[in-house]
Amino acid sequence: MRLTIENLSFRYGGREVLHEISFTAEEGELLAILGPNGVGKTTLFKCVMGLERPCGGRILADGTDLSALSPRARAHRVALIPQVHPLSFRYSVFDMVLMGTSHSLSPLALPGERERAAARNALERLGISSLADRPFDRLSGGEQQLVFVARALAQQAKVLLMDEPTASLDYGNRLQVLGAARDLARDGYTVLLSTHDPQHALWFADRALALHQGRILAYGAPREVVTADLLQQLYGRRIALIDTEQGPVVVPQEGD
């Protein structure tokens, strides 16, 4: 499913957070959205999900304006995968994933076999079926993040918004989650992944988009977009890119 953003703008009070943002994320593509804190990455995702109302522009999924859809109809197209966060209740992994099917039920209906099958299939697709009966709060951070991904798959949306999914993970779990995101794009999902780390865009993304002061600073193939000059503009630090057999590596430079 193609996601198209046309001239999207958003304000908090009098402060403009997004200014006429336009880009397209194609089916089967992983798009990495780069930028420091406060540039509008999370706000952009909230606008796509209908959690915030833009002051201008359109958001289209295969040509359908998402603002014209009910929350339930929107959930059939787009799913948000948040950062790992603590829960107040001890749900099992299976129940967490099953929650992703709630948009397909009437308010008082209980999940049936179709919904339970969707949850099982999502767990199997990510290779975490063995976790189904375990308490979610007893999992590692990487396992918890994969459960959130499985919940989005059970939702059966084709556009996945991953909001800094590796922010609290160790290195190994980061690679596991990023690898899963890349594999889902290869399977035909449209994946938008926000991140602070330019290395993620260079090694895992098909395209990269850099946000700066609410505007798109660069957009295109990661190795063309992610340059030393761009990273200095984004993060205010001198950074070099070193070519290796595995691809470019981001290296900080001494001094400012």
Image (tube, rainbow, N blue to C red):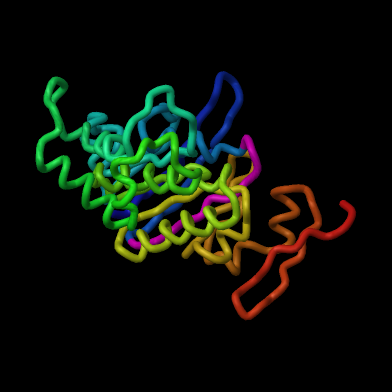
Considering depth in this image, is 197 or 52 the residue closer to the camera?
197
Task: State yes or no: residue 204 in magenta.
Answer: no
Residue depicted at x 69% and y 49%: 234
Number of on-image labels:
0
Please, is residue 212 above or below residue 222 in the view? above
- Locate residue 252 relative to residue 212 in the image: left or right: right
Residue extending furthest right? 255
User: Where is residue 249, by image quadrant?
Assistant: bottom right
Considering depth in this image, is 124 or 41 the residue closer to the camera?
124
- Locate residue 218 relative to residue 235 in the image: left or right: left
Residue depicted at x 41% and y 45%: 161
User: Where is residue 209, by image quadrant?
Assistant: bottom right
Task: State yes or no: residue 37 in magenta.
Answer: yes
Residue depicted at x 11% and y 43%: 114
Please, is residue 132 above or below residue 18 in the view? below
Residue 74 visible from this viewpoint: no
Residue depicted at x 62% and y 48%: 196
Considering depth in this image, is 22 or 153 the residue closer to the camera?
153
- Residue 124 position within the rendered picture, expressed as x and y whole percent measured from the top left: 27, 55
- Locate residue 127 relative to residue 215 in the image: left or right: left
- Residue 233 position within the rendered picture, expressed as x and y whole percent measured from the top left: 73, 51
- Residue 121 position within the rendered picture, expressed as x and y whole percent measured from the top left: 22, 52
Please, is residue 30 above or below residue 166 in the view? below
Residue 35 visible from this viewpoint: yes
Quadrant holding the N terminus: bottom left
- Locate residue 147 relative to residue 141 in the image: left or right: left
- Residue 16 position within the rendered picture, expressed as x and y whole percent measured from the top left: 58, 29
| Magenta-tinted stretch | 28-38
